[in-house]
Image (tube, rainbow, N blue to C red):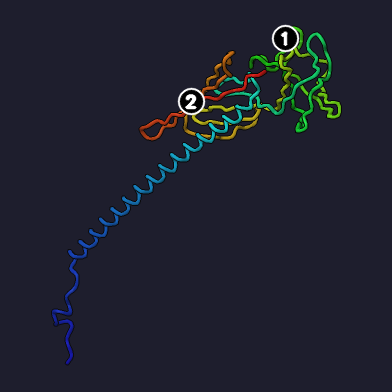
Amino acid sequence: MLINKLTHPSLTKGFTLIELVIVIIILAALGIATTTYIGKGLNIYNEISDRDKSLNSIRFAMERMRREASNALPNSVKVENGCLSFYPVKNSSLYLDLPVYPIEDNQAVINVMDDYSYDAADKAVVYLLNASELFVSDANGSSKVQSITGINTAMDTLSLSGDISFPLSSPAKRLYIINERLQYCMIGDDLYRQKNQETGVLMAENISGTFEVINATLQRNSLVKVNFSLPLNDLEVAFEQTLHINNVP
């Protein structure tokens, strides 16, 4: 028996327009809710990732600063133009003979430095008491920082740039060798690490920071107070660190 689909009620029944609209509205609501939930989750994840990245960069910068400052030339640390500046010690020795004013000579006799590798930019420093004495000559033409032009390992002598003299002798007869200057600079809201006049390397961004040098006394070494703050939404995370600088000129 053949059934006429056009006249049989059970075979012609389908979804009404209202039912389709209701289904579309329900699916749209579910889609919006799901998208909003996933979007909020991604935003939270991105905020946490950015926060951790900023915190880790500050921690890394402060740790590197601490390690490098611990090897700073005694009394060479200073703050100028928003930068913490110092000269790392490349090598050091005890000298046996040194041209001290009024004596002038072009060499210094030192103890053996087997691990010393000479560089044309190396300089010898003796008895530096203040950062302002760096590369400054006194009224007699003597300077506490002198350029090194070579080393004779067989004779344990440092060749100096001409007949020169140091203004004072170190009570402990210490001689330090320095090369490049290091700086940690706040430029805008970013912290940079710079060598000499080279372009700086970005260490941390979107922070504020200050440096303060506290000069040494007879009872303690000189100190550098480092303060950074990082804004996080409505909060501000503060970082404080005190760097201890060697004080044996």
User: Is residue 81 toward the left or the right of residue 44 in the image?
Assistant: right
Q: 120 above or below 37?
A: above
Identify residue type, mark 2. Answer: Asn
Element type where label 1 sits in the image: loop
Taking the spot 41% from the left edge, 42% from the top edge, the residue there is 48
Residue to which mark 2 is pinned:
227
Q: Position of residue 181 (x, y in %)?
A: 66, 26
Query: Relative to the observer, which residue lies in front, 227 or 72?
Result: 72
Report which quarter residue 121 is drawn in.
top right
Taking the spot 40% from the left edge, 34% from the top edge, the residue there is 232
User: Is residue 2 toward the left or the right of residue 72 in the image?
Assistant: left
Q: Which of marks 2 and 1 is nearer the N terminus?
A: 1
C-alpha distance separating marks 2 and 1: 36 Å
Report which quarter residue 155 is drawn in.
top right
Q: Residue 90 carries which label?
A: none
Q: Residue 138 carries which label?
A: 1
Identify residue type, mark 1. Answer: Asp
Please identify the quadrant where the N terminus is shown.
Answer: bottom left
